[in-house]
Every structure is written in C-alpha cells, then in structure tokens.
C-alpha cells in the first residue's frame, strides 16, 4: 500500500512560512500585492479566483480583482495589463484562464511584465526555465516538484512519464524534471500504446483531465504516481488515476482532492513573495 503524499499538509507548512515572510516584508513597509484579472463568467474560474483571494488574505498578501466584461476587446485587456505593469504597488499579475475566444491569451501573457508574471506563463519565464536560469516556475509544476522534494523522491536518472503536454502543466513540468536529471517521456492524445510506456516508468504523472484513466495495469509495482487531474463528476472531484486500485501497487501516490491542488495555490503565494522581493530590490 502506497504512502499518500499529503499536499494539503505540505501546503499548510509552506503557507505558514510565507506568512512569516510577508510579516518581515511588512516591517520594512513593503506590502506584497497580487492583481487577478478575470474575463467573463466562467464558473470554474470564479471558484479558483475566490480560493486565490482567500489564500492571499490568510497569509497577508494584498489582493485586487479586475472583473472584465466577456465582450471586452483585446486592446482593452492589454490596457488593463499595462496599467498593472506600471503600478508600483502591484507585485504580481495573474490572468485567469480560460478567456473568451476573441482574445489572444498568448499576447496577453506576453504583455504581463515578466517580473510580475507569478504564473510563469510569459515566454521569457518559459525560456528561462528551459535554460535553467532564475525564473518563475508555473504553480502546478512547482507544486509537484515540492512534493517530490518533501517525500525525498529520487529524480536523478529516474524514468518519468508525463501524460499531457499542456503549456501550463505537462511542458513546464518536463523542463523542471529535466533540470533535475530525470529522463522524461511526454505522452499525449496521439501517443500509441500508452500503457506500454507507463509500465516502465519509475514515476507516472497524469495531467490529462480524464477520470480514472490510469489503471493499476498501467504502472509497475512500486512506481510513484502523481495525479494532477481534476475531474468534476456527480460523485464529486476525482483525479486521472484510479486511486483505490493504483494505491495498492504504487509506492507513493497523491490523492484528489488534497494532493497537487493545494500545492498549486501555495506556490502561487510563494511566487508573489518572490516577485515582491525582486521588484522592491530593483527600486533600491
Ligand atoms: P489541457 O490543456 O486540456 O491538456 C490536456 C492534455 O492531455 C493534452 O496534452 C492532451 O493531448 C492530453 N490528453 C487528453 N486526452 C488524452 C488521452 N486519452 N491520452 C493521453 N493524453 C491525453 O489540460 P491541462 O490544463 O493541462 O489540465 C489537465 C488536468 O489537470 C485537468 O484535469 C485540469 O483540471 C487539471 N489541473 C489541475 C491543476 C491543479 O492544481 N491540481 C492545475 C491545472 C490543471 P493533446 O495535446 O494531444 O490534445
């Protein structure tokens, strides 16, 4: 039976450390502040934005929300971003995705000042991650890496298979793992015989958004299994992994909920503190 990797507990510890950091900054008259932009009325986004607001409040990070009409034009969105780029009191800027189809999310991410890009989606930060230079690491991959660190999972030379190649999870996570000397394979919807690939992996990470896709016959005994997926079913939230069965075969496994999800928010708060220090240092 696998050891459960408790993201909820680890995120509590990280948030407590962040709270202390924020208090230290406050004593120097520095007040970290996150701006969140949301366009339209996507229901899931509303839930995420609300939980980000709550998490910021809990650690003392100031928070300002910009709710924009779903019919907004691209120039208007860019204008909001540029204003936030130039505001001295804002240290982090986050654009909640998805945004409506008439808008170009890549141009929007590119417009966010890379020093305030706490989601790590600006191409400068993506490039820096690839070059293993200082950067913001996007929050979900960063959260997964923290879980590996906490549970002392050996990554050097490990054979890691990632299911999913999205720009926000699969791709940046593959860079993080490569930077730690893992051997990384990425699978996607066109990959053939996925189970033949996952069966040889020391670590399987699933980020595809398909409920209980990863079955016990797809992993080798003793593998580490990380479930990034969040699928809303009538029975509640379930991951991409058939948790009850896979946990009998894996050595470590993350639950859903309570695994990667809470880590994502903790790493966002961490990135806001990093952005604050970076920007305030520049002003001195
Ligand atoms: P996404 O942009 O929809 O990407 C999904 C990826 O999965 C794509 O690369 C897709 O392949 C691949 N895929 C889909 N079906 C597949 C299949 N049957 N076999 C192999 N690959 C398949 O999703 P995302 O934004 O990365 O999110 C993935 C999941 O993680 C979702 O459930 C999301 O809710 C969750 N998530 C959780 C957190 C968290 O904090 N825990 C954060 C972000 C996302 P193609 O590229 O070929 O289409």
Image (cartoon, rainbow, N blue to C red):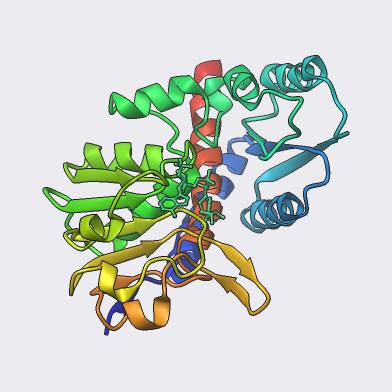
Q: Nearer the viewer, residue 240 or 123?
A: 240
The residue under the point 54% across, 46% down is 268
Toward which corner of the image does residue 280 lie, by quadrant?
top right
68 on left or right of 269: right
In the image, residue 31 above or below residue 76? below
* Residue 93 drawn at (x, y percent): 64, 32
**Quadrant of the drawing holding the N terminus:** bottom left
* Residue 3 drawn at (x, y percent): 29, 78
Q: Nearer the viewer, residue 63 or 151?
A: 151
In the image, residue 271 above or below residue 162? above
Residue 92 seen in the figure: yes
Number of numbered discs on residues: 0
Toward which corner of the image does residue 2 lie, by quadrant?
bottom left
Q: Nearer the viewer, residue 230 or 124?
A: 230
* Residue 111 drawn at (x, y percent): 62, 17
260 on left or right of 178: right
Q: Nearer the viewer, residue 242 or 78?
A: 242
Q: Residue furthest left?
A: 157
244 on left or right of 1: right
* Residue 57 drawn at (x, y percent): 70, 54
222 on left or right of 151: left
């Amino acid at each position: 039976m696998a050891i459960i990797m408790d993201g909820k507990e680890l995120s509590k510890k990280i948030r407590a450390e962040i709270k202390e950091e924020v208090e230290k900054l406050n004593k120097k008259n520095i007040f970290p502040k996150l701006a969140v932009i949301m366009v339209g009325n996507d229901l899931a986004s509303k839930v995420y934005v609300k939980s980000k607001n709550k998490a910021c409040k809990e650690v003392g990070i100031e928070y300002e929300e910009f709710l924009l009409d779903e019919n907004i034009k691209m120039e208007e969105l860019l204008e909001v971003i540029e204003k936030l780029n130039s505001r001295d009191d804002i240290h982090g800027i986050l654009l909640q995705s998805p945004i409506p189809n008439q808008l170009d999310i890549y141009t929007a991410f590119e417009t966010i000042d890379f020093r305030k890009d706490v989601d790590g989606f600006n191409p400068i930060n993506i490039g820096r991650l690839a070059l293993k230079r200082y950067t913001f690491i996007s929050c979900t991959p960063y959260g997964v890496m923290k879980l590996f660190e906490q549970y002392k999972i050996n990554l050097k030379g490990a054979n890691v298979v990632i299911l999913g190649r999205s720009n926000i999870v699969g791709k940046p996570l593959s860079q993080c793992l490569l930077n730690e000397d893992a051997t990384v394979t990425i699978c996607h919807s066109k990959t053939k015989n996925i189970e033949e690939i996952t069966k040889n992996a020391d670590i399987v990470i699933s980020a595809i958004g398909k409920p209980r896709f990863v079955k016990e016959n797809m992993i080798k005994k003793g593998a580490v299994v990380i479930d990034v997926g969040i699928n809303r079913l009538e029975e509640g939230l379930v991951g991409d992994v058939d948790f009850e069965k896979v946990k009998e075969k894996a050595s470590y496994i993350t639950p859903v909920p309570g695994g990667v999800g809470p880590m994502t928010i903790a790493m966002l708060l961490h990135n806001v503190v990093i952005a604050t220090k970076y920007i305030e240092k520049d002003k001195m």
